Image: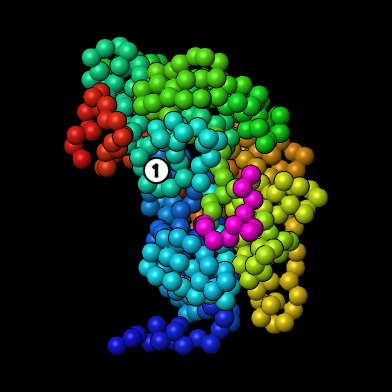
Amino acid sequence: MKSRAKIAYDELPYPTVIVVGGGFAGLEVVRGLAGQPYKVVLLDRQNHHCFQPLLYQVATASLSADSIAHPFRRTIGPMHNVAYRMADVQRVDPERKVVETNIGDLSYDYLILALGSTTNFFGNRQMERTAMQLKSISQALDIRSDVLQDLEAAISASTRDERLRALNFVIVGAGPTGVELAGALAEIRRTVVAREYREMESDMMQIVLIDSNDRVLKNFSEKSSTNAQHYLEDLGVDVRLGDRVVGGDDERIQLSDGGMLETNTVIWAAGVKGAIIPGLEADHNEQASRYEVDRTNALKHHPEIFVLGDCALMTDVEEWPRGHPQVATVAIQQGQLLVKNFVAKASGRPMESFTYRDKGSMAVIGRRKAVVDIGKYSFGGTFAWLLWMFVHVIQLVSFRNRMMVLFNWGWKYLSWKNTIRLIIRPYIRRNTLVSRPFAAQE
């Protein structure tokens, strides 16, 4: 016998809106359409929302995974007109208005694609096979295990070369993710490694940050870029600009200047590209790897399909001729406007065009070290660090998440310790290395 909640949802006489992706944009739409005259279905291959800006802290053992994740069903539970299905979307058939998934075909009246982005390796097939990525909680946990396994492997290494290779951590890409990750690893070297891995010299641990641009945080102001590089170098990070990784394997990488670096761990944070689903090729811009949309975020060939965030390409805006930046604030604002437009549509009112309000950029490098750009103002240091923490805590989905993050940050600040250094799920590479003692335990 069906429950009342399910009967009530199944019998809703509203147009069906399928939202694919529960990231910033998708969750904004689902929340906004709750209680509105639409029958909403949220599809995502994960059963939780992930707060991606803090993934690097899960990867560096500062936060637990559940601190930055929130189950979808807890969010949509009170929403009588919203349902969730854990599904992997395989194709869209716009002629039949059907979304093909691994759990079957689902029909829609309106389709909203908030697919997010994937890692962009810029055609580097070798790095695509061997480098680690940081786009999901599972990948963050892989990095955490890999780093901790490397530290243990270094202790038991039989030769100095093996130890140095295990302690060389290479990050490719000096955008916010790369810079924040490098700073966090450098603090681990300064505190945890120096105090708890007494059998080896902490200075043997090297963090190398590589970027082909001429400065870190290329999209920030020059002042913030200069401050960020100063903070990184003060923490002992080896910043290599104007260079790029052209190949490598599980034990070394090759640089464009002809040099080689021996390393077990390469983390690729060099760029992103929009996630794409087959079936909408008419609106797909292959060069940008994004879908071309109009000012209301609707596909130009299929106006009943809307695309938000990282995979949306809106080029008819004078300030952004190459499309908006692939950042969370764009996705959130597009989601908010789309909700407003759907409410207007239900009342017979016209839809509004999207205008991006740039609220600034920020990145944290370490304890009391951060940079912030807001309009024409750029500043760094302790105040920027406190502002970064405030903004990120406020943006977390639930009160529980906020309290967990604040508690962990407070304890880390007072104790100088990353407390969640547990190898729960050992990470195994495709080519298992003898120097990794945990590899055979899974």
Inspect the magenta stretch and tell me whether residue 39 lies in it.
no
Above or below — where is 398 with respect to 2? above
Above or below — where is 403 with respect to 365? below
Q: Horizontal and vertical percent for residue 187?
A: 45, 28
Whether residue 291 is visible to the viewer of this picture, yes or no, is yes
Q: In the displayed structure, does residue 345 sit left or right of residue 260?
A: right
Residue at (27%, 42%) from the top-left corner? 425
Q: Magenta part of the protein: which range?
A: 277-287
Q: Horizontal and vertical percent for residue 391?
A: 58, 49
Q: In the displayed structure, does residue 426 sit left or right of residue 385?
A: left
Between residue 178 and residue 104, name the one nearer to us: 104
Q: Quadrant of the N terminus?
A: bottom left
In the displayed image of the protein, which residue is found farthest to the top? 160
Between residue 379 and residue 164, name the one nearer to us: 164
Whether residue 202 is visible to the viewer of this picture, yes or no, is no
Which residue is under mark 1? Answer: 139
Residue at (23%, 24%) from the top-left corner? 434
Q: Secondary structure at mark 1?
A: helix
Residue at (51%, 25%) from the top-left corner? 245
Q: Amino acid at mark 1?
A: Gln
Q: Quadrant of the C terminus?
A: top left
User: What's the colour scheme?
Assistant: rainbow
Above or below — where is 409 with respect to 308? above
Disc 1 crowd rating (10 Å Cα; few below 14, some 14-19, many 20+) is some
Which quadrant of the figure has residue 165? Answer: top left
Between residue 77 and residue 275, name the one nearer to us: 275
Residue at (68%, 71%) from the top-left corner? 341
Q: Horizontal and vertical percent for residue 328?
A: 59, 51
Which quadrant of the figure has residue 298? Answer: bottom right
Q: In the displayed structure, does residue 437 sit left or right of residue 341?
A: left
Q: Horizontal and vertical percent for residue 23?
A: 51, 57
